Amino acid sequence: MKNTFMELREMIKKHHEMFGNAIPLIASENVTSPAVRAAISCDFQHRYAEGWPGERVYAGCKYIDQVELRCMDLAQRYWRADFADVRPISGVMANLISYTALSKPGDLLMCLEIPDGGHISHNLTSKNVHGLQVQYLVFDSKEMVVDIDKSSQKIRELKPQIVLLGASVFLFPHPVKELSEVAHEVGAKLMYDSAHVAGLIGSGYFQQPLKEGADIMTLSTHKTFPGPQHGCILGNKNEEIHKKIKNAAFPYLQSNHHLHNVAGFAIALTEMLEFGKEYHKYVIENAKALAQALNERGFTMLMEHKGFTESHTILMDITKFGKTVGYGATIEKLLEDANIIANRNLIPGDFEAGRRFQDPGGLRIGTSEVTRLGMKKSEMIQIAEFMKEIVIDRKDPKIVKNEVAEFRKQFQHVKYCFESKTKAYEYIQLK
């Protein structure tokens, strides 16, 4: 098995090498700092700590409890919340815990449909795991926003138990204040899935869901918030909901909660409390600049009339390339061949045109990770030029791949953190 061991390690090293020479544009990804990487490799990864700090089922949790309590305190401070449960092991689990706390099987949840930006955990996890019925909010695809009047009318008619805002394609803020008032009017709770925009919210650039009427805000910790892969649930002062969330997390849905990632989450919170304001300012500026540069080079970027985006995400309609180049799957692969990593994505109108997620009409692009590497507006223009060379000029992706690698040489370290001597994608081999 020694040879297999060496082969596996070589595969991991090659992945690191690939990303060290790539342009990472996946909107749901980011890169952690060396300090966070050190935290998630600590001995916490070997331990169990079922339950709430101070109420553990396991011994040996003295320092684990201290770190988790500090993580909760930092999360409440960063997101201006009265309650934080940092035990969910992912954003999907944060949602499932919240469904369990706020509803019972057979209840009705209202959310966005997937082509309108809704996430699979809204549409599928809620239905197939927790047994909820699902109906859709009304979405204005021309403005890429939830239609307040039509959605309000639908909420009043259907009287759901949960109204869920938030999206996987999240260009503009959602009408939390308006729809929370209607939800509360019919006895529903309003959830806000901030997985994609949590960092923007914490640094004060997007909207403030908990102040605008949301009962619960869920998130994952590795998108615009550049931590390890984990989850979190936040809330206002409501002891009844807090108790239900704590019980749903443990013992109902989770046992151990990946303690090393709680440690990494805590370190990332200190970084964002210190550097997040500057970092997220550039994330949004870069998204707008990249969208503008792509638009000017012949790509169809959605929402030009609204400045393209107010978040880290921009959305490209690639249907005009369908007959000559291909749809989402083909263009995603062409870009990947040049080490430009973006993902195909459903856009409004895809279902009506018979397109599905395997080969949709859109491309989703995010700027969180390239910004963490120190890139700014001039680099966004260069990235747009690389993409034009591949998709429009039909240049050989192998040639562009070499250009991309040369471009990446000056962006090898994580910025907006306390420690950055280790390269962003350096493989660390413990001896």
Image: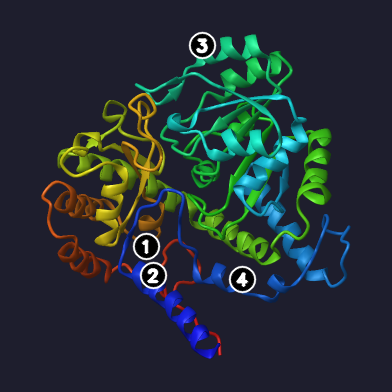
Determine the image quadrant of residue 340: bottom left
Tally the numbered discs.
Answer: 4
Q: Which mark is residue 413?
A: 2
Q: Identify the residue at image location x=51%, y=11%.
A: 149
Q: Residues within 10 Å of mark 1 (few under 14, many from 20)?
A: many
Q: Residues within 10 Å of mark 4 (few under 14, many from 20)?
A: many
Measured Cα–Cα span from mark 2 to mark 1: 6 Å
Residue mark closest to the camera, 3 vs 1: 3
The residue type indicated by label 4 comes to Ala
Measured Cα–Cα span from mark 2 to mark 3: 47 Å
The residue type indicated by label 1 comes to Leu
First reached walking from the N terminus: tag 3 or tag 1: 3
First reached walking from the N terminus: tag 1 or tag 4: 4
First reached walking from the N terminus: tag 2 or tag 3: 3
Q: Which mark is residue 373?
A: 1
Does residue 401 appear in the picture of this structure?
A: yes
Measured Cα–Cα span from mark 1 to mark 4: 20 Å
